[in-house]
Amino acid sequence: MNFTDIKSAAGDHGFGNNEERSRVKPRVIHPEGWAQALGYANGMLMADGTLHIGGQIGWTKDKVFEAKDFIGQMEQALSNVAEIVKAAGGEITDIGRLTWFVKDKAEYLAKQKEVGAAYRRVFGKHFPAMSMIVIKDLVEDEALIEIEGTAYIPS
């Protein structure tokens, strides 16, 4: 693939058009108004339109846990994923994969009805490929869930 092919594949994602570069670098996606991400990126948009969404936990754009319960944090984490996709120029339906990391399998299973309702409030009837992994802990002590994903943002 030559630079012209890469430039064409990049579409209008803000990668620029410097003819001297041999490859297009990924673009960091950081929704407007969010507190600064330290040591990670919320999203990385690749030249081919693939958006890698970093693990999102149940805190707000200001890094505040308003919800202390699993369902509230799950809904906030999903909303965060959606905001990153929108900031990259995409839509919910561009998401192809989600991976959920949960600390309490029993709570997740006991609240399936609430999980479904909260999910539909954010994602509607879009159901990408999903995996759930039960983990011992997360870096942020208050976090009960973390969700990461992959989307494809067509140019």
Image (tube, rainbow, N blue to C red):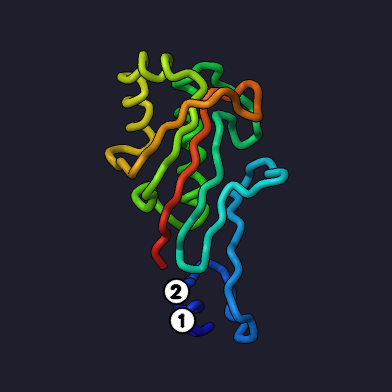
Whether 113 is drawn above or below 13: the answer is above
Res. 5 mark? 1
Residue 16, image quadrant: bottom right
Q: Position of residue 68 (x, y in %)?
A: 56, 17
- In the structure shown, which secondary structural element does the residue marked by tag 2 occupy? helix
Residue at 51% x, 52% y is 52
User: In the displayed structure, does residue 98 sit left or right of residue 135?
Assistant: left
Whether 26 is drawn above or below 57: the answer is below
Residue at 45% x, 50% y is 150
Of 93 and 151, which appears nearest the observer? 151
Q: Residue furthest left?
A: 125
Whether 143 is drawn above or below 111: the answer is below
Whether 21 is drawn above or below 67: the answer is below
- In the structure shown, which secondary structural element does the residue marked by tag 1 occupy? helix
Disc 2 packing (10 Å; few <14; some 14–19; many ≥20): some
Residue at mark 2 to residue at mark 1: CA–CA distance: 6 Å
Q: Are marks 2 and 1 in contact (CB under 8 Å)?
A: yes
Q: Position of residue 91 (x, y in %)?
A: 39, 51
Q: What type is the residue that disc 1 sits on?
A: Asp
- Residue holding disc 2: 9
Q: Position of residue 80 (x, y in %)?
A: 51, 39
Disc 1 packing (10 Å; few <14; some 14–19; many ≥20): few
Q: What type is the residue that disc 2 sits on?
A: Ala
User: In the displayed structure, does residue 42 sit left or right of residue 108?
Assistant: right
User: In the displayed structure, does residue 119 sit left or right of residue 40?
Assistant: left
